Image (cartoon, rainbow, N blue to C red):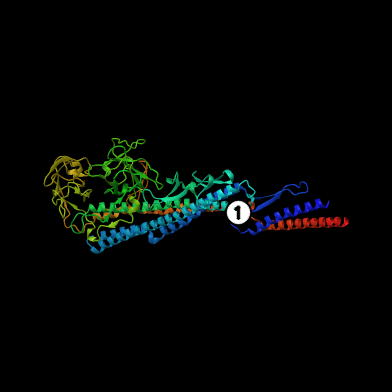
């Protein structure tokens, strides 16, 4: 009897010792991050022995996976909102507002119209033009600085992810080494460390886990790529830019160390890395492209209108702004020797969309496709096709729309507005089929637009032509002030200062109804107008329609009434072209979409475009805050659920400690009783 009692007592003490050790371990690790509480259970007593104890971790894998997913979503929006808030604040500040600079420029143009001969008023226009350029440069610099910050953080986070991936692979090997042995239960710390590393990795990227052989955990990205595989093998991240080295893309080194680009989808990647990439693609890239697009559209429109006027020195107007030329980025896989540069084709700035472009050599010799791409590098609409001319310059006249479904076809039709991108490309060298170049004209333009002149006298406020009615006219007819559409065609002489090539031009009403005779120093034409008498030179034909200017005859001229048009020599107090410059402020000159229906309003004014940019940033940031609050609540719920199952509860552990102490004391009492009985039996036999 005493022997059975002794066995029972010894077994009970050993069992309660195990229970007390497990409880003590739980209590001591209550503040240990990543610790999963443990429980020891024993089988039913057999042959006076308590069953062998089994210690295991109280872990619900479903709750753990849900926590990892919610953690990835939470950190995605935390990172996105943190970055977006900063940009939203900067763009909403009055000092950084492009609208303020644009309004100030055109307000001073209006002031100059009141005093077109005033050098002070003209100088103020140039000063404000310089200030506007500085504002665009500053805003572009803000965005560029944020891009650099994103690149730095991406490098840091990818290094952290690589460290965690390697750690998980190493811990997998350790776990596989003890799995199924007597040492498995003693390796709970290794399991906890691996689960903590997986949790930390979920803060950086969205992950999914699967159970592998021998207790290993296989880890995959949310987009499906494996990062931790069997037998401790793993893939690592790298940040590289192709073709733009300053535009980092996430890659995964697989297949013997060869870098394979990931199809990064922010909605799948999640985590801090996904938040950074989404912030860059959804806010930074569009912002910089739109700032550059507005700057190029404004500079081109101002230059072209200034060309149509006459400056204070009696010369035809020149450029006010210098529009930059940017070099295309060649892809690393290119095999040819070609190089590409791009700028805005004169007078086509309003056709430039706020996008980057891919220029690709087709299978046809000396032919390239021009494809707009969105913020994530995906094609928008369909490509345009252009044959490289002998001078290597591709303008709108060389572009043909590609047939949908056949990117190499060249249909016999002129490009529509949708097919025209406002680009002027220069391609040098020899390219092979498939060679590609990325054009980032918009994003690189805002910081590189400069003033072509600082002289207020170069502002062409006057019109280069003026008209007059003959003093002895008897009818009610009157000639309009005239309008200039081109200075590079047949009407103006290439002299400095310029004048009319053949002039003045005289228009005389004949005796025949609606018939006029137009003549200059070299040509003459008698023609019948189609009432009303609009665009007289266009209706006259015979070369007069090519002169680059025109006029109307209003009212009812009498027979032999004459009208003249001549160069506006000495017309410095004239502000007619200045009025056209002022009208640019309210002109629809900023293209909104690459793809648009024919009846859609696809252009906005400068102020509308900038207001739209600021609004878009605010809306995206606001939506991210709302989504972030929702996922933060979900993460808190998942954390509470996970902790209720796997976290240490001190109240529960204290109760267990008291219970196991009492059980240990009872077993000790049984052991003491058994020992007393045994001693008594020994004494009785002496």
Q: Position of residue 556 (x, y in %)?
A: 19, 45
Q: Quadrant of residue 96?
A: bottom left
- Is residue 73 shown to the viewer in this render? no
Quadrant in the rendering for residue 397: top left
Image location of residue 416, percent across then percent down: 31, 40
Please name whichever residue, 399 or 207, is drawn nearer the observer in this view of the structure.
207
In the image, residue 406 above or below residue 333: above
Taking the image as shown, residue 617 lies to the left or right of residue 120, namely right
The quadrant the C terminus occupies is bottom right
Q: Out of 164 and 89, give the one closest to the viewer.
A: 164
> Residue placed at 37% from the left, 35% from the top?
405
Position in image of residue 380 (x %, y %):
38, 43
Residue at image mark 1: 189
Q: Position of residue 514 (x, y in %)?
A: 18, 41
Q: Which of these two is toward me, 179 or 486?
A: 179
* 288 sits to left or right of 529: right
């Amino acid at each position: 009897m005493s022997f059975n009692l002794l066995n029972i007592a010894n077994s009970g003490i050993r069992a309660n010792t195990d229970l007390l050790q497990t409880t003590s371990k739980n209590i001591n690790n209550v503040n240990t991050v990543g610790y999963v509480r443990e429980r020891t259970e024993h089988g039913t007593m057999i042959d006076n022995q308590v069953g062998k104890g089994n210690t295991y971790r109280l872990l619900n894998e479903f709750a753990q996976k849900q926590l990892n997913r919610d953690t990835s979503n939470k950190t995605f929006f935390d990172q996105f909102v943190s970055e977006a808030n900063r940009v939203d604040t900067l763009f909403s500040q009055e000092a950084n507002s492009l609208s303020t600079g644009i309004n100030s420029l055109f307000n001073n143009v209006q002031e100059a119209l009141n005093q077109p001969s005033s050098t002070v008023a003209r100088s103020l226009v140039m000063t404000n033009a310089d200030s506007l350029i500085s504002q665009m440069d500053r805003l572009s610099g803000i965005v560029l600085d944020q891009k650099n910050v994103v690149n730095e953080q991406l490098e840091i986070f990818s290094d952290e992810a690589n460290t965690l991936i390697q750690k998980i692979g190493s811990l997998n090997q350790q776990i596989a080494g003890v799995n199924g042995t007597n040492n498995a239960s003693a390796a709970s710390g290794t399991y906890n460390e691996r689960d903590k590393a997986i949790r930390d990795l979920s803060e950086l990227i969205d992950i999914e886990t699967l159970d592998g052989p021998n207790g290993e955990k296989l880890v995959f990205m949310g987009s499906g790529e494996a990062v931790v595989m069997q037998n401790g093998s793993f893939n690592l991240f790298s940040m590289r830019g192709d073709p733009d080295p300053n535009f980092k893309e996430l890659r995964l080194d697989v297949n013997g160390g060869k870098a394979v680009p990931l199809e990064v989808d922010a909605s799948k990647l999640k985590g801090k890395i996904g938040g950074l990439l989404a912030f860059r693609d959804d806010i930074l890239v569009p912002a910089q492209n739109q700032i550059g697009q507005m700057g190029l559209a404004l500079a081109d429109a101002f230059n072209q209108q200034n060309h149509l006027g006459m400056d204070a020195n009696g010369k035809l107007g020149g450029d006010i702004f210098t529009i930059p030329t940017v070099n295309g980025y060649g892809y690393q896989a290119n095999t040819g020797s070609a190089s590409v540069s791009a700028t805005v084709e004169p007078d086509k700035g309003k056709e430039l969309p706020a996008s980057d472009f891919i220029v690709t050599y087709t299978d046809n010799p000396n032919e390239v496709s021009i494809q707009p791409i969105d913020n994530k590098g995906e094609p928008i609409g369909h490509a345009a096709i252009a044959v490289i001319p002998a001078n290597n310059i591709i303008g709108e006249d060389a572009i043909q729309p590609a047939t949908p479904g056949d990117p190499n076809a060249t249909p016999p039709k002129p490009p529509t507005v949708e097919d025209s991108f406002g680009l002027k490309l220069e391609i040098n060298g020899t390219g092979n089929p498939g060679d590609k170049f990325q054009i980032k004209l918009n994003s690189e333009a805002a910081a590189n637009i400069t003033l072509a002149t600082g002289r207020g006298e170069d502002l062409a406020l006057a019109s280069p032509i003026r008209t007059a009615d003959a003093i002895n006219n008897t009818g009610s007819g009157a000639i309009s002030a005239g309008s200039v559409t081109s200075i590079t065609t047949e009407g103006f002489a290439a002299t400095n200062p310029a004048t009319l090539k053949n002039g003045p031009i005289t228009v005389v009403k004949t005796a025949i109804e609606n018939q006029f005779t137009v003549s200059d120093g070299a040509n003459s034409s008698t023609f019948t107008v189609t009432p009303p008498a609009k665009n007289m030179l266009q209706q006259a034909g015979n070369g007069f329609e090519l002169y680059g200017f025109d006029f109307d005859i209003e009212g009812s001229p009498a027979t032999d009434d004459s009208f003249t048009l001549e160069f506006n020599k000495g017309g410095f107090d004239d502000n007619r072209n200045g009025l056209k410059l002022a009208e640019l402020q309210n002109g629809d000159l900023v293209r909104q979409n690459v793809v648009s229906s024919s009846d859609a309003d696809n252009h906005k004014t400068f102020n509308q475009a900038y207001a739209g940019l600021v609004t878009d940033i605010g809306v995206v940031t606001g939506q991210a805050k709302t989504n972030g609050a929702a996922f933060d609540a979900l993460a808190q719920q998942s954390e509470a659920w996970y902790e209720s199952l796997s976290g240490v509860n001190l109240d529960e552990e204290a109760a267990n400690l008291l219970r196991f102490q009492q059980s240990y004391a009872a077993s000790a009492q049984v052991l003491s009783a058994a020992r007393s009985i045994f001693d008594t039996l020994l004494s009785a036999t002496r």
